[in-house]
Amino acid sequence: MSRMPAAVLAVVLGVLCTLMSVPVPAHAADAAAAPYAEIDAYVRDRMRESGAPGVSYAVVGPDGPIHHRSWGTDGRGDPVTDRTPFLWGSVAKPVTATGVMTLVQSGRLGLDDRVADHVPEFTFDPDVTVRHLLGQTSGIPPEATFEIADCHAADCPRPAGRLADLDDLDPLGPPGTEYAYTSANYVALAAVVEAVTGRSFADFMREAVFGPAHMDGVIADAESAKKLAPGHQYLWGIPTATADEYDPHGAAYGYMGGDLNDLAAFASAQLRPGSMLTPESVQQMRKETKPGTGYGFGWRVGGLDAPLQNAIWHTGATPGYSAMIFLLPERDVALVLQQNLYGLLRDDSVMKIGFGAARVLAGAEADDAPFATVHHATVWGTTALALALVLTTARSIAVVRRPRSSRRVRAIAAWSLAGLVPWLLLAGVLTVLDARRLWAWVPDATIALFTAVLAGTATAILRAVRPHQRDEGEQA
C-alpha cells in the first residue's frame, strides 16, 4: 500500500483536530439523556413532594453508570453531586453478604458453620449457622434490632461485644424454621467476619469487596464517616438537618455509605457475575432461603408488582438518610438512588421515589405516592395532646396559690401519687423503648411525647391540689 504524502496527511490531521474541537451541540447531549428524561422528571417531582433536600441517582449497566443525576444540597448547604457521601442503611446488607460469600468461596468459612464455633459470645442458640444469619432465619426476633443496633455512643462495643444482649430474647423457633428480618443477624455476621479474618469488618471489606468493585469512597467506620454531612429528618413535616450520629461498628447492617459512584460500582459488579463472586454464588444469594419469605442472602427477591416481579433489590435507612438498589437482571441494568432524608413514620412516601423510578426504568408507570397518614396522625396527635396538657397545667397553676396545713399537704401528696400512676407507666414505656433511639428516629414525636408526660404529671399534681384548696376556702 502506498503511503499518504506528508503534506496531505498534515492537512487531514488538521481538519480532524478542528472538527474534534467543535463543541457537541446541546440537542445531541439532550438526545443522549432522552431515554431517562422521564425518570429524571419523576425523581424531581417526588423530591419536591417529599421535601428531600438532596437526591442522587444513577442507571447502571455492567460497565458502570449509563446515566446519573444529582440535585439539591447536603446538610451543610453544599451542592449534592455524584461525589457527595450518603449513608445507605440496610442496602449495606447485600454488600455485607457479598463479603461473607467471598470467605465462603475461599474456604475460610462455611455456610453451615455454627456461629458459636467462631464467636463464643453468641450464646443465643448454639445451632444457628452462617446460612441462617444471611437469610434472616436464625430465629432472632425483630425487636433484637433495638437491643444491639443503632449504638451512637463513643464507647460502642464491637459486634461480638453486643451479642450477649440477645440472651434475654426468646427464639421464634428452631433455626431455619422462621423468617424474621432484623439487623441483629448482620451484627452477628460482622462478628463472624472479624473472628475468622482477625481484622476489623471495615478493613476486611475494603480488601474483599470495596477494592475489587472500585468502591473507593465507602464509609464503613468512624474515621471515614467524618466526611459525612448531617442527614435530614422531619420535624413537624419540615426536613431538618439534625441527624449526625454514627454507629462506629455498625457498617455491616446499616451504617455503611458512600457517594453515588460507590453505590453504582457495587450495582455494576452485581451485573457482572464472576467479578467478585462465581455465578453459582450469585445465584445462591438471589434464591429465597425459605420459600415465601422473599429474602435470599442479603437481597430481597421479587415480591414487587410487574414489571419488577423478578427484581433483586433492597432499601435502607438510617436516621437522616435513605437509599435503594434495584437489579433488573432480565434487562441487564440496575437503578441506585440515595437521598439525605428519612422519616420512620413516613417510610412509604419517602421510599416511593426509588420504587417509582425503578418502575419507570422497567417501562411502566409509577404508582401514586402514599399519603403520610401514620406520620400526621402520630406526630400531630401527640403534639395536640401535649399542647392541651400544657394549657391545662397553666390554668391549674393559676388556681393553686394558697398555703396549706401539713395535714392537707399529706393528703395532697397521696392524691398526687395516684394521679401520677398513668404518667409513670408511660414514662416506663419510654424507658423500655429507649428514649435515645426514639429521638434518633422520630424526634418530633419524641419531643411531643415527653412534653405530654411532663405536662400530664404536672396536671395530675395540680388537680390533686385543687379540691383541698376549695375545702380550705369553704372552712375559712
Image: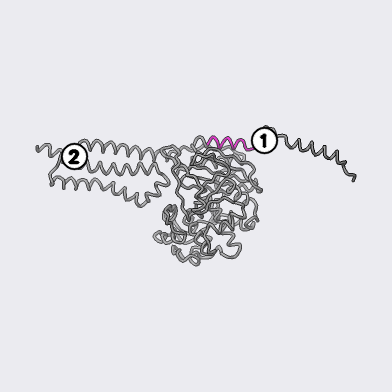
Which is in the foreground here, disc 1 or disc 2? 1
Q: Position of residue 366 (x, y in %)?
A: 56, 38
User: Which stretch appears magenta?
Assistant: 33-46
Q: Image quadrant of residue 466? A: top left
SS at circle 2: helix
Identified by mark 2, the residue type is Arg
Q: Say whether residue 35 is magenta.
A: yes
Q: Position of residue 375 (x, y in %)?
A: 42, 40
Identified by mark 1, the residue type is Ala
Quadrant showing the C terminus: top left
Which residue occupies the foreground of this view, 81 or 226? 226
Residue occupied by mark 2: 466
Q: Earlier in the sequence, mark 1 or mark 2?
A: 1
Q: How is the protein colored in the picture? A: one colour
Mark 2 neighbour class, 10 Å CA radius: few under 14, some 14 to 19, many 20 or more: some
SS at circle 1: helix
Label 1, label 2: how far apart the Cα atoms are: 76 Å
Most extreme residue toward the bottom is 117
Q: Position of residue 194 (x, y in %)?
A: 51, 62
Which residue occupies the foreground of this view, 13 or 98? 13
- Who's the residue at 34% across and 37% down the image? 384
Q: Say whether residue 113 is magenta.
A: no
Q: Position of residue 124 (x, y in %)?
A: 44, 62
- Assign the magenta stretch its main secondary structure: helix
Question: Label for residue 29?
Answer: 1
Decide if residue 55 is in sight here: yes
Question: Label for residue 430?
Answer: none
Left or right relative to 388: residue 30:
right
Decide if residue 142 is in sight here: no
